Every structure is written in structure tokens, then in C-alpha cells.
Image: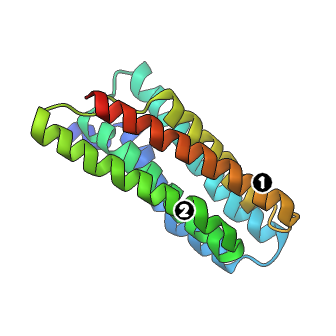
Amino acid sequence: MQINKKEIFYIPNILSYIRILLIPVFIILYVKAETNLEYFYAALALGISSLSDLLDGKIARKFNMISELGIALDPIADKLTHIAVASCLCTRYRIFIIPVCILICKETYMGVMNIYKIKTKNKKLGGAKMFGKISTTVLFIAMIILVLFPFMPSVIVYLLTAICSICLIVAWVGYFFVFKKL
């Protein structure tokens, strides 16, 4: 991967750096939260992160700021954020360990398969597929809801956990077939 020095300072890449820097901010806010307002601040940090995720791709495409660095950095920021938020949720909702384990296994599988396909067939996954984007969106919405409303009934927590788990499994299976075709 060739990185042009000016690409480091592209606005979409700066937004990805901000997302990565917001991870410890979110963790500290969430772990220390005791009141609804404190949980709101944690959700706000998460909301800013998700807004910057939405903007970085739009800005990159509109202003022709797509770079190799950005292509690598964006999914790394996404995965680090997802794993950090999901792990934090496990401290409050033990059941959320299920989608966390599925997420880690899915992402590990995808990373290993990407490396394998690049080395053996000189092919790589050409970006996220629609089922992956839907899974990521559902996961992120559920996590924001769980952060924003920390005192919701258990049945809703279980329902959101089940929905996240199902979406992650569907995406994992979908990527299994994508990698099989590569």
C-alpha cells in the first residue's frame, strides 16, 4: 500500500482518526456512567462517532478524496468501535456476550480469508456487501439504544441481542459464500 503524505490529512481520514480517538472517550464515559444523563453523554460520543463514519465516505466520494489509507482505516475504525461498544455493553448486559463472540469470530474469519485470498489468488473482498452493511447498521442502532436507555426491561435487551446475533450470523454466512466464490 502506497501512502501519499497529503492523503494522511484528507478530511475523511481525519474523521476516521477522530472515530478512533472517540473510542476511549466512549469507554470512560460508559464505564463511569450511573445516571441517565451520564449514559446520554456516552451515547452522544457514540453518535458523534457514527456521524463522522457517515460523513467520511460521503466526503471521500464527493471530493475525490478516496485513498488507500482511507480504504484501510475506515473499516479498522468501524471494527474497533463496534468491539469496544459491544464489550462495554457486556458489563451491563451479560447476555450481550453472544453477539460479541459472533462479531469477533466473524471479523476474524473475514480477516483471515482476506489475507488467504490475497496471498493465494491475488484477490480481495471488494468492500462491504449489502448484507454486511445491514448487519452493521442493525448492530450499531441496537448498541446505541442499549447505551441510551440503560434501564430498559430485560425482554427488550434479549430481543435486541437476538436481532444483533441473527444479523451477524446472516452476514457471516453471506461472506462465507462471497469468499468461496473468490
| Above or below 35: residue 43 | above
x then y, percent, for residue 123: 19, 31
One can see residue 2 in this view: no
x then y, percent, for residue 12: 41, 37
* Camera-nearest residue between 93 and 105: 105
- Mark with earlier residue (2, 1): 2
Q: In the rendered structure, which amino acid carries the disc numbered 2?
A: Val
SS for dot 1: helix
| Above or below 171: residue 156 | below
Q: Tell me the crowding category of disc 2: few under 14, some 14 to 19, or many 20 or more residues within 10 angstroms, Cα based.
A: many
x then y, percent, for residue 15: 45, 44
Q: CA distance from mark 2 to mark 1?
A: 15 Å
Left or right of 161, for residue 52: left
One can see residue 31 in this view: yes
Q: Residue at x 59, y 63 (%)?
A: 98
x then y, percent, for residue 138: 65, 42
Using the rendered view, name the quadrant where residue 159 is placed: bottom right
Circle 1 residue: 159
Circle 2 residue: 100
| Above or below 1: residue 23 | below
